[in-house]
Amino acid sequence: MTGRAALSLTGEAPALHRLRALAPLDLAAIEIIEHEASRSRLIHRGRNLMNEGRAIVRPALILEGWAARVRLFEDGRLQILSFLLPGDLIGHCHHAYPVAASTVTALSDVRYCAAPPASLSARLAQAYAVSQAYEEAYLLAQIARLGRLTALERLGDLLLELLERLELCGLAHQGRFELPLTQQILADATGLTVVHVNRMVRELRQHGDITWSGGSLVMHDPPGFARKLGRMATRVQESGART
Amino acid sequence: MTGRAALSLTGEAPALHRLRALAPLDLAAIEIIEHEASRSRLIHRGRNLMNEGRAIVRPALILEGWAARVRLFEDGRLQILSFLLPGDLIGHCHHAYPVAASTVTALSDVRYCAAPPASLSARLAQAYAVSQAYEEAYLLAQIARLGRLTALERLGDLLLELLERLELCGLAHQGRFELPLTQQILADATGLTVVHVNRMVRELRQHGDITWSGGSLVMHDPPGFARKLGRMATRVQESGART
DNA sequence: CGGGAGGTTGATGGCCGTCAACAAGCGTGG
DNA sequence: CCACGCTTGTTGACGGCCATCAACCTCCCG
């Protein structure tokens, strides 16, 4: 795991694994990605990849490590808007004035490269489009989480999302994945305090839902856990009205 | 205000007003929009324009009225993900599998039309792209609101956003606008209960921040109110780390 | 006049924040 | 080697914000 970019458990680079999962890529697209990935850069934990309101220098593709879009208030309150994992795109925008809508901070050391231009490959463009749709879905999920779930549900729901996303880039198997986050970061993501996150983690452990130590987390029964959270299909009926 | 689509206070159709504010439109683009708008449809309050998980029949443009993207949980909990106002686009997506990421419900009677295809006008495409950027910004704002603001701040911040958005389509002036929402809907948007929203509204009234009756709301000093909420530029410093 | 939707207010309680203290791990430098 | 400081995790006591429950009001419309 040193020197070159880490490989996923299937032996493929995580970012490429994700993009291939989103849309079938031809050899040309793969070579474009690998070409850019060969010129990767490293940024250390706590540094920003992008600053809210400032111009976007160039869209980037995360190769390794965890980042987050964050909003910082004047009085010190901080909210994590979304997590960015290997294979995620940063600063991809479609209009002429590329201004960052949020600050992006490295939560761990992050390896990234310039995002290969979508214009070079129709398949790649398709993968980007699907990636964007996923990103929107994650934002919507985060809103529902913060608005209507309890503390325990927020944490569990977030862990389920992270598991699914890491599976998508080949970094999770059998409910097991590396979680290089502090409880403070989980608190900033779930809108809670560290103290309360700690209590909720304790509950998840005591209920046998997760094992988490040494940066490695195991969810013992993801489908059962999801069911327990009532996280089933949430279709609405014909009429959106409530009682 | 009957028969044809309502006009904004400046005498221009709200949706067109907004799109022109986002990007300068040439005559061709305006005619394309007016052409589609002339074939508008009406949907009644409480009905859905779109259902989560189902295919998107065709992207739409809101001409008049209020809608919302909502998520409904099995146990009846409901969260409004974002509001949709005149000039907003629904179901605009960039990949080949147009599936709705959320249900869209009409909060009032809503007049809408098919969204004119972006391919017909480069100017229109630009307006759509900027519109999409705004939409993302509103989602991020909603996340920060739900995650880290108190009840009073959530309500005030939301009202400020609505004011700004309505100004963009010419439906608000001098801090005054029509607010065709019940307190229950504000509760579903802010992640609170109706009872508590009612108490917060009372506070805003008592502090002289707003007047709200008969569906018409006046914010007496928007900049001052924004300052009071600490809603200033929230740039982060060079390092994203906190104490 | 009856019924429903929406608004308003009070009493009570629980979830989660706040404050505080301590433990565990780890790198650094004396 | 060990003291030291820093980060992170952990637990308990206490309090406040907001949910819950309940009642009553106004307004509107059939």
Image (cartoon, coloured by chain):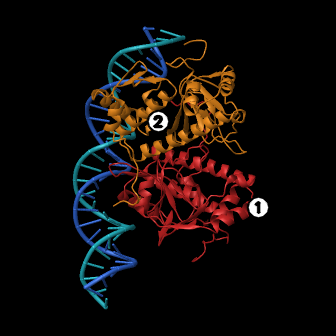
Chain colours: A red, B orange, C blue, D cyan
Element class at badge 1: helix
**Tags 1 and 2 touching, CB below 8 Å:** no
Residue B12 falls in which quadrant of the image?
A: top right
Where does the image place residue B16, in percent across and percent down from the top left?
59, 25
Same subunit, labels 1 and 2: the answer reads no
Q: Is residue A102 left or right of residue D19?
A: right
Q: Nearer the viewer, residue A130 or B68?
A: A130
Q: Foreground residue, A203 or A30?
A: A30
Q: Is residue B70 above or below residue A45?
A: above
Amino acid carrying label 2: it is Asp
Query: Residue B72, can we see it?
Result: no
Q: Is label 2 in a helix, a strand or a loop?
A: helix
**Closer mark to the observer between disc 1 and disc 2:** 1
Determine the residue positioned at 37% across, 42% down.
Answer: B232
The answer to whether B50 appears left or right of B83 in the picture is right
Quarter-of-image position of residue B146: top left
**Residue drawn 44% across and 34% down?**
B161
Q: Is residue B9 left or right of residue A169?
A: left
Label 1, residues with CA under 10 Å away: few <14, some 14-19, many ≥20:
few
Q: A212 or A136, which is in the foreground?
A: A136
Q: Quadrant of the N terminus of chain A?
A: bottom right
Chain designation of label 1? A
Q: CA distance from mark 1 to mark 2?
A: 48 Å
According to the picture, the residue beneath numbered tag 2 turns out to be: B188
Q: How many marks?
A: 2
Tell me which amino acid carries mark 1: Ala
Residue at image mark 1: A28
> Dot 2 falls on which chain?
B
Residue A11 sits above or below residue B155 on the image = below
